[in-house]
Amino acid sequence: MRKLISSIAATALAVGAAVAVAGPAEAVLPSLRFHGAQYDSPGPDNGSNASLNNEWISLVNSGRYPVNLYRYTIRDVSNHVYTFGNVSIAGYGGRIWLHTGNGANNSVNRYWYSGAYIWNNTGDTAYLRNASGSPIDSCTWRQQNGRTWVPC
């Protein structure tokens, strides 16, 4: 009987430890990453706000929980930096787009308010960092014939 109780206790301890490790890790480490980049605005690069806003980069959250992006940054190799305000990206495939030009921020569209294009048509790298500056993800592309969008 004592051996059976010890075996049950050991199993319960092992299962409890596994649950304790797996549960919080998912909440702390969201699956946030770049989804894609429209690095070359369709049509002529005339610098209009419509053209600037057709240049964008998007994030996706495949984790269970929403992620508040407050103080997260997106930057490029030329060190153009966008810092998110208090906005959350939903879990289970939630997406958010960061457009280069001006517009009204909402829960899925954010605007850099840049008067110039950010992403290089010949190739670039986008970097996502969390609020403490730690790298989360990056997306690199090269110019592609006839294509202005890339998956990350």
Image (cartoon, grey):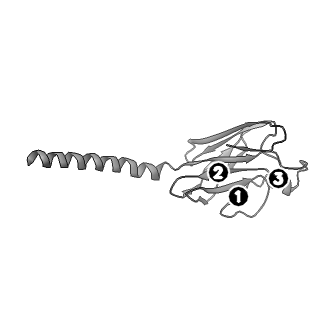
x 70%, y 58%: residue = 110
Specify whether 66 is left or right of 149: left
N-terminal of the two: label 1 or label 2? 2
Evaluate if marks 1 and 2 touch, with contact meaning CB atoms under 8 Å apart: no
Q: Position of residue 119 (x, y in %)?
A: 77, 43
Alpha carbons under labels 1 and 2: distance apart: 11 Å
Task: State whether residue 38 appears in this view.
Answer: yes
Residue at the image point whose x is 84% and y is 41% from the top: 146
Q: Earlier in the sequence, mark 3 or mark 1?
A: 3
Q: In the rendered structure, which amino acid carries the disc numbered 2?
A: Leu
- Against 13, residue 87 (above or below) is below
**Residue 120: percent from the left, percent from the top?**
80, 40
Query: Can you tell which of label 3 and label 2 is closer to the viewer?
Result: 2
Instruction: Check disc 3 and give the amino acid type.
Output: Leu
- Few, some or many residues within 10 Å of mark 1 (<14, 14–19, 20+): many
What distance separates the C-alpha of mark 3 from that of mark 1? 13 Å
- Using the rendered view, name the quadrant where residue 123 is placed: top right
Q: Nearer the viewer, residue 92 or 104?
A: 92
Q: Which residue is mark 3?
A: 52
Residue at horizontal 17%, vertical 45%?
A: 7
Lower position in the chain sequence, tag 3 or tag 2: 3
Within 10 Å of disc 3 (Cα), the crowding (few <14, some 14-19, many 20+) is many
Q: Secondary structure at mark 3?
A: helix
What residue is disc 2 on?
59
Q: Dot 1 corresponds to which residue?
A: 110
Q: Amino acid at mark 1?
A: Arg
Label 2, secondary structure: give it: strand
* Residue 9 or residue 108, whichever sits in front: 9
Neighbourhood count class around disc 2 (C-alpha, 10 Å): few under 14, some 14–19, many 20 upward = many
